[in-house]
Amino acid sequence: MATLDFPSPPTPNGFSHAVVVAPGSRLIVTSGQVPIAADGSVPSGWADQTRLVFENLTEALKSAGAGWSDVVKLTFFVTDVDHLVTVRAVRDEFVDVARPPASSLVQVAGLFRPDLLIEVEALAAVAS
């Protein structure tokens, strides 16, 4: 994955404005992952929910033959932007902070269950 730097807008914090996918790469698109464990439980709090989302994404990527170094784009859906510091700290445990993926974040009124705080989907590109 190559990232692009350009003079405007200003340098982002924790994500890339643009990412180039190598020709011939196999694209992997995940569904939005939510913080529901295999046993159906949902942890409380932003840190634990975000960590479970990223663990679920890890499993989805692995099942398709990809890993975090292959992720080129993340899309976040959060119910409260006041917790972005926590979300970013957990995200940084998984992504390559030296070459972060492109990213979008949307605040939503709610997810499909009221106890869920965050949902994240990923786009990965694996060299063929």
Image: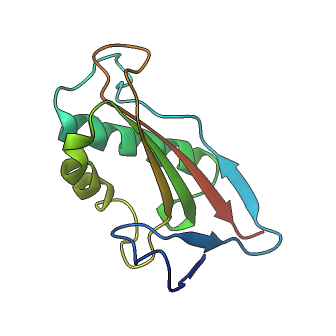
Lateral position of residue 108 relative to residue 89, left or right:
right
Lateral position of residue 82 relative to residue 100, left or right:
left
Q: Name the residue nearer the viewer: 100 or 67.
A: 100
- Residue 58 image position (x, y, % from top left): 45, 48
Residue located at (22% from left, 57% from top): 89
- In which quadrant of the rendered image does the C terminus lie? bottom right
- Residue 19 image position (x, y, % from top left): 60, 71
- Residue 95 image position (x, y, % from top left): 40, 63
Q: Name the residue nearer the viewer: 9 or 17.
A: 9
From what the image shows, is residue 92 above or below residue 47? below
Q: Outermost residue, left direction? A: 45
Residue located at (52% from left, 59% from top): 67
| Label tally | 0
From what the image shows, is residue 2 above or below residue 47? below
Q: Quadrant of residue 11?
A: bottom left
From what the image shows, is residue 35 above or below residue 18? above
Q: Outermost residue, right direction? A: 24
